[in-house]
């Protein structure tokens, strides 16, 4: 945990190796950013909003080297689906369906359209924002990593973890 | 004339689907049977909307007037 002043360059907070990786900004309910978007970015609401993200819970999660952001997101959504309180139907049904659709996309080259559809079906349809935050994470994955989505559709993962298509 | 809005009390809704039966003009059901409210309630279907609100077995549907627009 670090306390930094607003305006601190992101490069002062993250190492050089971390700056070269995709960053999940704002925690599990946050937004993915590509490495190219991190250059020159400062820890400030204005800068981060301009990059199309929000600082959220203030958690920065750089992707570990060799990992594919899609594989990571699928694992996160698996976890988040399990964390639904299960009180509202769209979340109770929608998040497990979203986790399944993501597994299908990431590991079996399934359609991204189904994932997008489920993002729409859970957003603003619950008493709390747990489904909204989960949909935000997934929507940012689709928006930031279209090349990876395309290559997964062809059965190719750019991460170096071989078990992905096992 | 201002348009009314339909709101769903999500924890209360148990996917009976009565609202979509009574007001298909505004409400459809998702793949799990929960309502999708497509648009504000126009005056021509206001009576139907009130019926749908009253008919909900779990009282999960509410009709609200939008706040007045700032002058």
Image: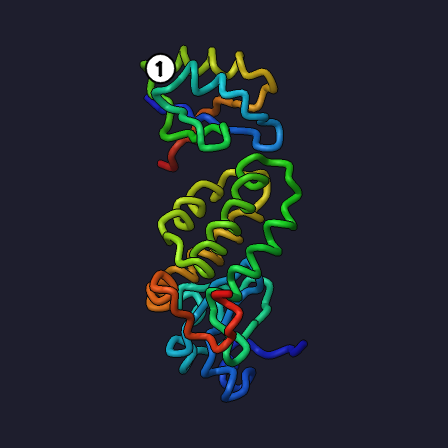
Give the position of the N terminus of chain A as an image quadrant. Answer: bottom right
Establish if A120 lies above or below A157: above
Q: In x, y percent, where is residue A62?
A: 53, 75
List the single residue furthest toward the front.
A166
Q: Nearer the viewer, residue A51 or B57?
A: B57
Residue at the spot x=51%, y=48% of the render? Answer: A132
**Colouring used for the render:** rainbow
Indicate the position of residue A107 as horizontal and vertical percent values: 47, 61
Chain of residue at mark 1: B
A100 versus B62 height, above or below: below
Is A145 left, or right, of A163 in this rendering?
left
Residue B32 lies, with reference to residue A50, above or below; the image says above
Of A50 and A17, nearer the camera is A17
Task: Please name the residue that numbered disc 1 is placed on.
Answer: B45
The residue sitting at 59% across, 38% down in the picture is A127
Q: Residue at x 43, y 62 (%)?
A: A141
Identity of the residue drawn at 37% across and 19% down: B24
Q: Is residue A144 visible?
A: no
The residue at the far bottom in this view is A16
Disc 1 crowd, CA 10 A, few/some/many (<14, 14-19, 20+)? few
Q: Is residue B46 visible?
A: yes
């Amino acid at each position: 945990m670090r306390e930094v002043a607003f305006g601190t360059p992101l490069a002062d907070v993250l190492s050089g190796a971390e700056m070269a990786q995709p960053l999940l900004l704002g925690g599990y309910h946050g937004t993915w950013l590509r490495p190219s978007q991190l250059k020159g970015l400062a820890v400030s609401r204005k800068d981060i909003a301009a990059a199309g993200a929000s600082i959220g819970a203030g958690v920065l999660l750089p992707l570990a080297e060799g990992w594919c952001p899609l594989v990571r997101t699928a694992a996160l959504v698996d976890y988040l689906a399990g964390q639904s309180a299960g009180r509202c139907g769209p979340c109770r049904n929608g998040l497990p369906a979203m986790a399944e659709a993501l597994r299908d996309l990431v590991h079996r080259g399934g359609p991204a359209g189904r994932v997008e559809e489920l993002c729409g079906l859970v957003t603003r349809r619950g008493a709390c924002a747990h489904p909204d935050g989960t949909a935000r994470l997934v929507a940012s994955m689709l928006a930031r990593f279209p090349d990876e989505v395309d290559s997964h559709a062809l059965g190719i993962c750019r991460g170096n973890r071989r078990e992905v298509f096992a | 004339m201002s348009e009314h809005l339909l709101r769903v009390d999500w924890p209360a809704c148990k996917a009976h689907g009565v609202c979509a039966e009574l007001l298909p003009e505004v409400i459809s059901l998702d793949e799990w049977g929960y309502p999708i409210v497509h648009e504000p309630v126009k005056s021509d279907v206001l009576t139907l909307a009130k019926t749908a609100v009253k008919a909900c077995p779990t009282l999960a549907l509410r009709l609200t007037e939008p706040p007045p627009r700032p002058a």
